[in-house]
Amino acid sequence: MASGDLLLRTHAGAPVLTRAFPCRLLVLTRRRRGLVSPLAAAKVGVAGRARPGGTAAVQKRRRRDAGESLSLSRVVMRRDAVDEDEEEDVEGEALQLGAGAVTRGDDEGGVDGSYLSDTRFDQCAISSLSLKAVEDAGYERMTEVQEATLPIILQGKDVLAKAKTGTGKTVAFLLPAIEVLSTLPHQRNQLRPPINLLVMCPTRELANQVAVEARKLLKYHRSLGVQVVIGGTRVTQEQRSMQANPCQILVATPGRLKDHLENTPGFSTRLKGVKVLVLDEADRLLDMGFRRDIEKIIASTPRERQTLLFSATVPEEVRQISHVAMKKDYRFINTVKEGDEETHSQVSQTYMVAPLDLHFSILYDVLKKHVAEDADYKVIIFCTTAMVTKLVAEVLSQLKLNIREIHSRKSQSARTKVSDEFRKSKGLILVSSDVSARGVDYPDVTLVIQVGIPADREQYIHRLGRTGRKGKEGQGLLLLAPWEKYFLGTVKDLSISEAAVPSTDSSVETEVKNAVRKVEMKSKECAYQAWLGYYNSNKTIGRDKSRLAHLAEEFSQSMGLAVPPAIPRNILRKMGLNNVPGLRSS
Ligand SMILES: Nc1ncnc2c1ncn2[C@@H]1O[C@H](COP(=O)(O)OP(=O)(O)OP(=O)(O)O)[C@@H](O)[C@H]1O
């Protein structure tokens, strides 16, 4: 056995070597079904089963592991203590990996390389084709989540993985999945070649991005290809391209995939070939908005597939319902250390509370200061809805800031253009709805501003996670109206501090008022209606309808309107807001 090889004992007790992971120092032995790491083994007196010598990195890791409380060993011990007869039925066996923060300076382009592990890709038993591609991509060391999940995925286990934003989850699921695919026999000239890897993403931008990452990793796997199917593009075009050049890997958004399932001849047969199914941003895909489509899609893939669920947030409800997608004996791998926050410590988080009519002035002030302080500024402003996003973008554009706008009401080609531009550029402010909230990897975002309450705690974390990626620094600001302050209760475990509301002089206020005035009435009407819809469906704010109408009036005043816009009667009815005093119907 090579030093540090991962030894697994099968149920029958026969040792088997895993394909990967020379240096996690996880020499797992079975005390019947208990797992013992070398560290834990030493503690529980079974040291000597294997004590790898290891490379300098290994030694370093071992020292680190020994010095810091390694939650892995704790978990391993806990598992060891699990009643043996129950253990087989333990759902979602958990590995809590201590991602010890080791500051390594700016060597990885970030301020802190702690998102990286000590394990290099060339120390893993991945194929030489994948390794070459990984090296070409510039990846040398694995991130913590990649290190933690690779061996387990290669064992064929279903995995639910939680790791902070911007820490390489995409490669963490793609790389082992590609390894699985590369071992499958290729049947050429099949009428309907199977889709072997299906990756589901909640947004189109994310699906495209995942496909780009997959293409990087497939660079030398010439027989494997990737295709994307997303909403907002022509179904027929996708059908033609799938027919002309069917690929083994498909990245998709749920609605469009369901569309192909129902309408594209032979597509459901192709899905019967799925070996690995990935739900990226799993908690989002399993929430009520997507749940039905996802269940249908899952049901169209074979039961014996391997399923991988990844996200930066895994609320308890998601663990409860993960059986919808995964086998009973799935592994829950959590790289967020026990007691650690789900957000990054190198991202400073602040909030401001101010009446709605000050929000544009505050935004302007904060942005002007940020632009002046950082020539390489790159800001994302998240707004509650697509139409509010449009309004905010229009007001800020009037103020001569360098603004781009992205949301679901834009054409897909405009979305792709803006997204590509923002990825490459600096000196830009992107005003966005939640289409950019999850997964999207824009490098070097310096500031994330969230205007109004996010849909929930998870959305706050994902939006904030657009900055501070790959160990870099970043700033986050949450701008709330006084009646939105209750939201802070849901994120009170995060390090968010209050920032003073900047005092704006009257000339700035006039400038902002003029900018607001120049925005078309139509934009304001649409924003008002969308705003009302958003807060109406908020459990706390939408409960009291007459108060909601009053708050909506405040919003309309912040847009410079003396009288709130009228809303079509049928829309008010759909919102359950018919005859609510203070709301006007047309
Ligand atoms: N081993 C690695 N070394 C260096 N960079 C890496 C490595 N793995 C991935 N990256 C890069 O890290 C960045 C963040 O990766 P990715 O977008 O997969 O993060 P994520 O954890 O999925 O984030 P989110 O939770 O926001 O979806 C990407 O630019 C990716 O190319």
Image (cartoon, rainbow, N blue to C red):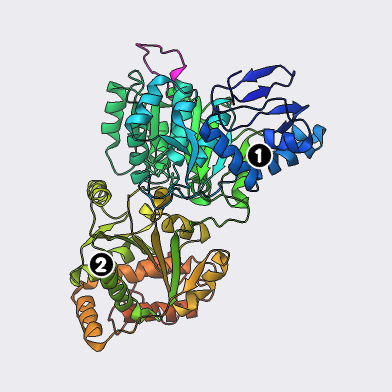
Label 2: which secondary element: helix
Mark 2: C-beta under 8 Å from nearest atom of ligand 1: no
Whereabouts is ligand 1, in terms of quadrant?
top left
Query: In the rendered structure, which disc, 2 or 1, sits on the residue that comes first in sequence?
Result: 1
Mark 1: C-beta under 8 Å from nearest atom of ligand 1: no
Image mark count: 2
Q: Position of residue 320 (x, y in %)?
A: 64, 46
Q: Residue at x 25, y 67 (%)?
A: 371
In this view, 371 is above or below 126: below
User: Dots 2 and 1: beta carbons under 8 Å?
Assistant: no
User: Nearest the camera: 228 or 329?
Assistant: 329
Which mark is on residue 371? 2
Depth check, mark 2 against mark 1: the one in front is 2
User: Nearest the camera: 468 or 514?
Assistant: 468
Which quadrant of the rendered structure holds the C terminus?
A: bottom left
Please tell me how crowded label 1 is: few (under 14), some (14-19), or many (20+) other residues with Cα within 10 Å: many
Which mark is on residue 169? none
In this view, 62 is above or below 380: above
Q: Residue at x 74, y 30 (%)?
A: 47
Q: Would you say residue 190 sits in the magenta stretch?
A: yes
User: Nearest the camera: 292 or 213?
Assistant: 213
Q: Position of residue 448 (x, y in %)?
A: 37, 62
Region rendered in magenta: 182-196
| Residue type at numbered disc 2 | Val
Q: Main secondary structure of the magenta part?
A: loop
424 left or right of 6 in image = left
Q: Is residue 421 visible?
A: yes
Figure quadrant of residue 324:
top right
Which residue is the site of mark 1?
92
| Residue type at numbered disc 1 | Gly
What's the CA distance linking mark 2 and mark 1? 46 Å
Q: Position of residue 378 (x, y in %)?
A: 28, 59
